Amino acid sequence: MSSDPAADLVIDVAGITKRFGDKTVVNAIDLQVRRGEIYGFLGPNGSGKTTFIRMLCGLLTPDAGSGTCIGCDVRTQQAEIKRNVGYMTQRFSYYEDLTIRENLDFICRIYDVPDRAAAVRRSLERLGLEKRSHQLAGQLSGGWKQRLALAACLIHSPRLLLLDEPTAGVDPKARRDFWDEIHGLAADGLTVLITTHYMDEAERCDRLAYIAYGNLLARGTLDEVIARAGLSTWTVAGPDLRGLAAALRGRPGVEQVVAFGNTLHVSGRDAANLRAAIDAVRDPRHEWAQAEPGLEDVFISMMDEAKDNFR
């Protein structure tokens, strides 16, 4: 690593804003991501995550704000950014009537990759696609389509990987294999910014940012994000949890009541009022215990408080 912290920033932007008509979809976001870091970018659907990523990779121009991506100005050097970033969209990008090998060769032509045959061969080997290289992309399962999309993003040796919900719709094993590959890439020095709705995936990131309706609400390590939320959380088990949940909702101090398997998580930021609300409905049939809030508790709380900019 460089002795200069700024030299290690692959993404360094401030005040990035995008409007469509009278709606501000991304509102003055600041973000810094270091080389070799896996940075989780989280938020509900419609929160502005994809729009922000498209500004980072040179597909959209910010209406306000400034900064750099891989050392290039996000407003004036978009062509250079596109050549050196791998962007995996929510819908995997490939031609269904071409084979895996043909798809990768086509991407090599787009990026003018030298020695295409060798580059394709290395990509097939790295992602375990050799035995399927002559299979049509349209015949692949979700997990293999995901591998092909990742191979296509990596074949031109990008300095930054932008992944927009890459594991949506794939099975748990494919998700695990994918994350093992991402951690291997980061260990080799590749920087990754990834959006996801899965809390277990978010917990595998080095740092996190949470965006809701265009506004950046939290950022930091997992422990920092949870601690700064200031939530107090209780769990409760026992009979008729549905009735108990109805009795709790709306009481002072109770911000959320969420089912987790055979228990409820009851959370709020005012610990004293939350405790009073719980005491008011206590029943010997129920077993209560104070617990550490989880990432999902925190993000549900943030989402409940965020103002919907499209209302």
Image: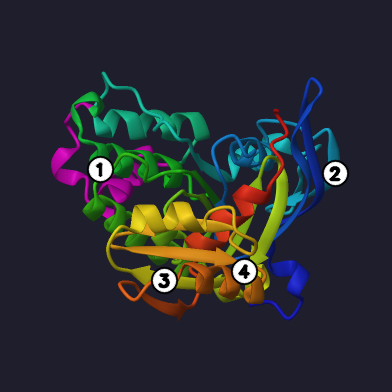
Is 192 or 102 nearer to us in this picture? 192
Q: Quadrant of residue 264?
A: bottom left
Q: Image height check: is 257 above or below 1?
A: above
- Residue 143 badge: 1
Q: Which residue is mark 4?
A: 225
In this rendering, which labeled residue sits more in front, label 1 or label 4?
A: 4
Amino acid residing under circle 1: Gly
The numbered mark, 4 or 2, whose residue comes first in the sequence reads 2
- Tell me whether the residue at label 2 lies in contact with that at label 1, contact meaning CB atoms closer than 8 angstroms: no
- Tell me whether the residue at label 4 lies in contact with that at label 2, contact meaning CB atoms closer than 8 angstroms: no
- Residue 235 badge: 3
Residues packed near mark 4 inside 10 Å, few (<14), some (14 to 19) or many (20 plus): many
Q: Is residue 229 left or right of residue 107?
A: right
Q: Quadrant of residue 34?
A: bottom right
Measure how far apart labels 1 and 3 are at the Cα level. Answer: 36 Å
Measure how far apart labels 3 and 2 are at the Cα level. Answer: 43 Å
Magenta region: 115-136
